Amino acid sequence: MDSKFSRELSSGITSLALLAVLAHADEPMYGYRIAKEMSGDNGDFQLIKQGALYPVLKSLEKSELLESLVEPSVSGPPRRYYTITDSGRETLGRWRILWDNTCILINGILEGEIHE
Amino acid sequence: MSKHIEKYLDELKEALSSLDKSTIQDALADAEDHLTTALQVEAAERPEMSTAVLIAEIIEKYGTPEDILEQYSDIEEITTPIFAASEKSPGRGFRAFCSVVTEPRAWAACLYMLLSLVTGIAYFTLATTGLSVSLSLLPLIIGIPVTMLFLLSVRAIGFVEGRMVEALLGVRMPRRAISPGEGLGWWSRFKIILSARSTWTTIIYMLLMMPLGVVYFTLTVTLFSLVLSLIGAPVIQYILNEPILYMNQGVWIPFYVMPVVVALGAMLVVLSLHLAKQMGKIHGRFAKAMLVS
């Protein structure tokens, strides 16, 4: 039950977090760096499996919120570097507001303020 | 590639077996990319750790094959190929039969069939030239890089053709260009590509595309010129007031036959589009069998 809830919870947040990570990045990032960035400093807690990022990256790119470029790496396979597009930044702005409002609402409900 | 990664990829392939072939190929490409890059980065940062420990940690974070199965089956539900979504459940009756005229997929199939003459000739030329040049140069040292180049171009074309098939025929095809054995030495890559079944089926597909392209193109052009003349002839005769049908001498289409001729033309459009749609479906299945490993 826990894993089902956490999967459902993470499905929308993943896109939001990916856009945010890329919006803060100064340079294009490849998949593994994004994944590391997403796991944060809190070592043990992991909301999303890293394997879930790639299909989301692909679908964000398809909706033109991200762009990507493949570049050869010094050692090992070539890497796909992602950058956020202008429309990605706009979308992030809107989603941010949605997220903030959701947080306020849900936290309120969780603390039982609504009924008082 | 590390043994551990290979083992994980095998398990992943097994776990994903219920999904579409192309989705499996994409998921495997993503996993391979991630795991090799992760291992490379982590090994450089923490050289004191053993590869086995690092890999276990990386795979733990990446997710079990079952996690990946859930993720990719979720995402596939929302990203179906463009025209696959436009396929309505086939209604009954004459109106439903004619509604094919409004189906983007049927028109896209016509476009594919028209283009297939050009692509077919190009594929055939490349495949025959590549095969004969590679084979005849093989006894010399230079033959091996030439063969490698040819096989790499075959794989690239297989991917591009797949994208075209997905865009125009609505069959889900791989969305990641994968190059087997990437990161390995070129000799082992050469061996992997040479022994991959899909390399050879792609070459056969390229050879077959020429006769198929000729048939598709001819059929499309013939049917559509027939449609145009059936609908156009009565109209033009009416406007110009001159016979435009010639059999030794000008033949007038009688006035009362005109609506029948035009209606025949309209009916033929509907039939041709149904034919194009069906042929597109069959060709899509064929392309999938040949181009996806």
Image (spheres, rainbow, N blue to C red):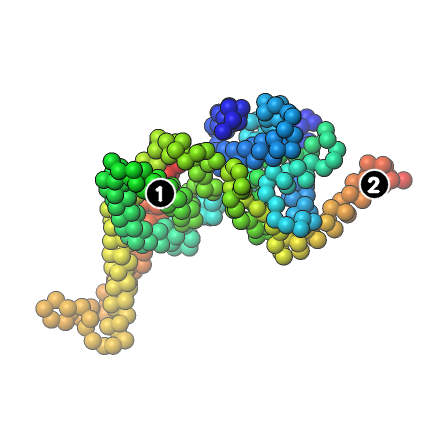
Side (left or right) of B212 relative to B26: left
Identify the residue position indicated by label 2 in the image. Answer: A108
Q: Farthest right residue?
A: A116
Q: Say which of B119 and B184 sits in front.
A: B184
Residue at 53 percent of width and 38 percent of height: A75
Q: Position of residue A101 (x, y in %)?
A: 77, 47
Which residue is tagged 1? B149
- Residue B290 appears at what percent x and percent y? 34, 37
Mark 1 and mark 2: span between their CA atoms?
A: 63 Å
Chain ID, mark 2: A
Q: Is residue B186 above or below residue B222?
A: above
Point 54% across, 44% down: residue:
A80
- In this view, which residue lies farthest toward the left? B248
The residue located at (64%, 41%) in the rendering is A34
Which is nearer the eye, B148 or B246?
Answer: B148
Q: Chain of mark 1?
A: B
**What's the residue type where badge 2 is placed?**
Gly
